[in-house]
Image: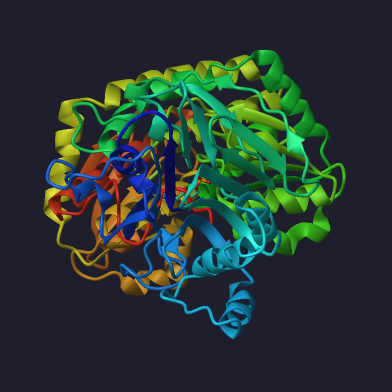
């Protein structure tokens, strides 16, 4: 949530370079954007409301500069206005800062600063940081003033500061990501690696409660002990093109299509590691699957696979609700955190709660080196490659695949799990062909103007119905809800009227007849039944065929939904990569 990008080095137009980097981070926030660059007298500042992707550098040349910081915003405190856009500056315009996160004690700090005569120009929590820094700079040098400022902040943050006359960037983090890219006589700072991948694959991690001062060479400090810390430079294995759209119109469709390959990559894990982690699950006194949004639905779907395959009960809790369950955690409990980004604040908080209780944490993440990856006792990387569209697609199926594999490993049947998933990966590869997509596009065209739609499923397909609703809501903006088929008659069936689309997720197992009966109940009230099923059934008005994938039916059933959501978004002229009000990585609570 919010993208940060900064540059210090030999290139002559740091401002332009930062704008180009921010364009790659736009998926993290696209309400407004801004950049501050070092100009001879005071800092140059450019701030705009709207998407940075629409800013044309050809027609808007930036002045020469070798140091700049930038930000693309997802609004938390204060509306979407230029005054609330980052960077924020002090009254003289000699200090600028960008910030991602929430300063929880900003009201108290603001009151204190106002009493000292500081005048606020925005409604943001962020502006308190720059005035506080200004205050401390009156008595201290820039670095000491920054340390004093950071010591006063409560909450999660990633923050960068620059000051006229100081050719340096100060950056610090607590709970929100920042990574340093190391080039030849130049440095990049970004919320996410893809922003600087075209320049360098050498990185340094800034950990929580650390600050880095970058001039010629980065100097890292632990903010608690104030001591300097040594850091290693790590080479990452990511190709610049993996974070580009290539020939696809949108990242979302590119990432859906990448599922031809990502499931194979996900399950290509070291058997010994998977078996060891399965043992951890088996010996745990209480296993808690935790995730948010789509990742939370993946957790719920996996709980059915664990029940059926491994005959094990697991608790499923969404990240934001986890603190209320902490009394059930023991030292021998295991928290399995599922996250694409590895940076979701609510999931991170759940991990923090678990660690305080002495429980072990296994993270299933996509982003290598993310906060979750680094703070967990064990990690499984899903290896899906950068996922940039806000709507999660390839990460979802990879997470489902990994959890399915773990369930089989818990049942001492790892090879059987692998066989099933390899077969499913092959089936998904076959599904993702142009004719299949056209069939779904046709359906999208038929239903593109509806006001509401519903999705029902049973057993493992019930969480997939919930996930389907998220997918449809977030990119098509059509009101969509998911239900367990059996729940309809307890209330929601009142919502069905003539022509209301209802997607029915069918698996070829003991649940088939029940869900088809539920579909009949909807049809009897005028509903338009869209069946996602291995077989054609008489109740269907529109049939989308999926392979019979047995215990992996959740993986195949979500694919047509992803395609449908994408095509509905395109037909309704929404940008599927950057849906309104959302951001890719939710780093605020
Ligand atoms: O990065 P994470 O997997 O932790 O993100 C969790 C949710 O914010 C995310 O899945 C969100 O619900 C997606 N936009 C859904 O497509």
For image coordinates 53% across by 28% down, the residue present is 382
Residue 102: percent from left, percent from top = 56, 63
Q: Nearer the viewer, residue 503 or 78?
A: 78
For image coordinates 34% across by 38% down, the residue present is 14
For image coordinates 73% across by 50% down, the residue present is 352
| Residue 247 location, quadrant | top left
Residue 254: percent from left, percent from top = 28, 31
Q: How many numbered marks, from 0 up?
A: 0
Residue 176: percent from left, percent from top = 57, 49
Q: Where's the C terminus, which quadrant? A: bottom right
Q: Is residue 404 left or right of residue 491?
A: right
Display colour scheme? rainbow
Q: Residue furthest bottom?
A: 115
Q: Residue furthest right?
A: 331
Q: Nearer the viewer, residue 296 or 178?
A: 178
Residue 258: percent from left, percent from top = 33, 26
Say if residue 363 shows up in the picture: no
| Residue 156 location, quadrant | bottom right
Question: Vertical placement of 151 versus 162: above or below?
Answer: below
Say if residue 91 shows up in the picture: yes
Q: Nearer the viewer, residue 191 or 364?
A: 191
| Residue 62 location, quadrant | top left
């Amino acid at each position: 949530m919010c993208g940060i990008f900064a540059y210090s080095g030999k290139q002559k137009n740091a401002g332009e370079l930062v704008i180009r980097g921010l364009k790659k981070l736009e998926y993290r926030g696209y309400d407004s954007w801004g950049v501050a660059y070092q100009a001879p007298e005071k800092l140059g500042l450019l701030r705009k409301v709207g998407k940075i992707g629409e800013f044309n550098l050809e027609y808007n040349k930036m002045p020469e500069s070798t140091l700049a910081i930038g930000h693309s915003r997802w609004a938390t405190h204060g509306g979407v206005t230029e005054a609330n856009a980052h960077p924020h500056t002090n009254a003289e315009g000699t200090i600028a800062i960008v910030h991602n996160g929430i300063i929880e004690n900003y009201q108290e700090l603001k009151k204190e600063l106002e009493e000292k005569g500081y005048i606020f120009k925005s409604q943001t929590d962020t502006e308190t940081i720059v005035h506080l820094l200004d205050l401390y700079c009156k008595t201290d040098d820039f670095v000491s003033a920054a340390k004093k400022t950071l010591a006063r902040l409560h909450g999660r943050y990633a923050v960068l500061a620059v000051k006229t006359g100081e050719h340096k960037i100060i950056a610090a983090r607590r709970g929100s990501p920042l990574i340093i890219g190391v080039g030849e006589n130049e440095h990049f700072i970004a919320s996410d690696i893809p922003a600087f991948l075209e320049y360098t694959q050498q990185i340094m991690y800034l950990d929580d409660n650390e600050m880095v001062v970058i001039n010629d060479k980065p100097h890292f400090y632990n903010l608690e002990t104030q001591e300097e810390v040594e850091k290693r430079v790590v080479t990452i294995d990511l190709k610049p093109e993996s974070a580009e759209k290539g020939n696809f119109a949108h990242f979302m469709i590119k990432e859906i299509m990448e599922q031809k390959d990502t499931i194979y990559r996900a399950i290509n894990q070291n058997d010994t590691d998977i078996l060891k982690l399965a043992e951890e699950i088996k010996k745990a006194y209480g296993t808690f699957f935790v995730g948010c949004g789509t990742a939370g639905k993946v957790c719920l779907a996996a709980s059915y696979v664990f029940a059926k395959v491994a005959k094990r009960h697991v608790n499923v809790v969404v990240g934001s609700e986890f603190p209320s369950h902490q009394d059930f955690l023991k030292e021998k409990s295991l928290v399995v955190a599922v996250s694409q980004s590895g940076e979701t604040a609510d999931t991170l908080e759940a991990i923090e709660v678990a660690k305080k209780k002495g429980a072990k944490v296994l993270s299933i993440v996509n982003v290598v080196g993310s906060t979750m990856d680094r703070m967990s006792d064990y990690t499984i990387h899903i290896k899906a490659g950068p996922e940039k569209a806000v709507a999660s697609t390839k990460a979802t199926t990879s997470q489902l695949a990994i959890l399915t594999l773990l369930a089989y490993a818990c049942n001492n049947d790892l090879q059987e799990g692998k066989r099933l998933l390899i077969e499913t990966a092959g089936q998904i590869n076959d599904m993702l062909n142009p004719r299949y997509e056209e069939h779904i596009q046709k359906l999208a065209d038929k239903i593109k103007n509806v006001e509401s739609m519903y999705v029902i499923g049973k057993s493992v397909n019930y969480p997939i119905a919930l996930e389907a609703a998220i997918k449809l809501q977030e990119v098509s903006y059509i009101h969509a809800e998911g239900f367990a088929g059996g729940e309809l008659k307890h209330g929601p069936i009142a919502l069905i009227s003539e022509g209301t689309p209802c997607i029915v997720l069918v698996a070829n197992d003991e649940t088939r007849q029940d869900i088809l009966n539920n579909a009949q109940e909807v049809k009897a009230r005028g509903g338009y039944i869209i069946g996602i099923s291995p077989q054609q059934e008489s109740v269907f008005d529109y049939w989308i065929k999926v392979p019979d994938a047995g215990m992996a039916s959740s993986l195949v059933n979500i694919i047509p939904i992803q395609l449908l959501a994408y095509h509905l978004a395109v037909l309704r002229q929404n940008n599927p990569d950057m849906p309104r009000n959302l951001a890719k990585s939710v780093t605020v609570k």
